[in-house]
Amino acid sequence: MAQKQEEVQIVPENRVYGRPALLTDRVMHYCPGCSHGTIHKLIAEVIDEMGMQDRTIGVSPVGCGVFAYNYIDIDWAEAAHGRACAVATAMKRLCPDKLIFTYQGDGDLSAIGTGETIHTCNRGESIAVIYVNNAIYGMTGGQMAPTTLVGMKTATSPNGRDVKLHGYPFKIAEMIACLEGVRYVTRQSVGTPAGVRRAKKALRKAFENSMEGKGLSFVEFVSTCNSGWKMTPVAANQWMEEHMFPFYPLGDIKNE
Amino acid sequence: MAKIRGAVVIDKERCKGCEVCVVSCPCGVLALSTEVNGKGYAYSYMANPTACTGCASCAIVCPDSCIAVYRQKFPTE
């Protein structure tokens, strides 16, 4: 029998993966290859799988992630710069049956919002904190962030981050892991398909902890900012693996 | 024995040509086009469609969620 060239039929019953139902049709404003898009997709998938669309409220930050409310079809609140955890605390206390999460970048969570973040963690509010760490201020043009690696060149550290002048990068996940109120701290990345799958499981666990009232769950995403780093998206993913992962190792830091 | 084959459908107007799917594909199916879309980005397309197994690695890493994956089983003699 002659080998017939089979064609896969593009019909709904053959569909195995597609755009999550909770993502809106709006084209994301993020640069090509930005990790934010992948993380938005994971949040949309997990909320959809948990059937929580009508009972979820996100708190969006100031930074590149500010327009998250345009892309995921759930309820959102927009917090002042760095204050997302404080806003989420109020919402969780008023609506304990809702899934409340914050979506913050490193400039928002670990610079201007450090105080709010640490106190919210210490109070053990049952919220999920999603922290996107790309080691740079992406939106404002690639300035040095508290999380910028030693020696890393940015717009405001053109000779590389100097420890004597700027201090050491901030490992906020390890810092908050020692607090009693924090239940789950993990660090993930979305540069590879395997990484995305692991990150999705971590996100689901964080959201479930939040719904079960188990205390605060913190999911850090080590991410790229290829525009700020001045690299192609593929080179940025590689640079992240070579330089970010040794300093920000992936995996669960606390899981009780 | 059955053979499983896959295919992807890429929303080329939504694609920003980041190339992350191209390097994530374990079968070397995808490539960037020489033409550009309405926004001026070279978009991803199936350059080698017969190699696709429908593993969805490309769609999982796509930051703009513009890839849909289809998979079908074909009986072999």
Image (cartoon, coloured by chain):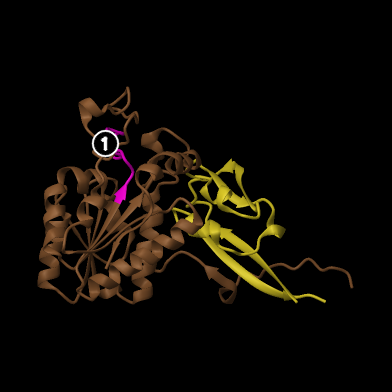
**Magenta residues, start to end:** A132-145
Q: Is residue A231 rendered to the left or right of residue A214?
A: right
Q: Residue A227: where, in percent of width, then height?
A: 39, 37
Q: Is A142 covered by the magenta stretch?
A: yes
Residue drawn at the location 11% of the way across and 56% of the way down: A119
Of A173 and A33, which appears nearest the observer? A173
Q: Chain of mark 1?
A: A
Q: Residue B25: where, in percent of width, then height?
A: 59, 54
Of A144 and A66, which appears nearest the observer? A144
Quarter containing the N terminus of chain A? bottom right
Label 1 sits on a secondary structure element that is loop
Quarter containing the C terminus of chain A? bottom left
Note whether B11 is above or below A20 in the view shown: above
Q: Is residue B61 visible?
A: yes
Of A223 and A60, which appears nearest the observer? A223
Q: Residue A74: where, in percent of width, then height?
A: 28, 67
The residue pinned by badge 1 equals A140
Q: Is residue B34 rendered to the left or right of residue A31?
A: right
Q: Hey, which quadrant is residue A199 in on the image?
A: bottom left
Q: Colour of chain A?
A: brown
The amino acid on which the numbered mark 1 sits, given as a three-letter code, is Thr
Note whether B55 is above or below B1 in the view shown: above
Q: Residue B57: where, in percent of width, then height?
A: 54, 59
Q: Colour of chain B?
A: yellow
Q: Hey, which quadrant is residue A111 in on the image?
A: top left
Residue drawn at the location 23% of the way across and 38% of the way down: A146
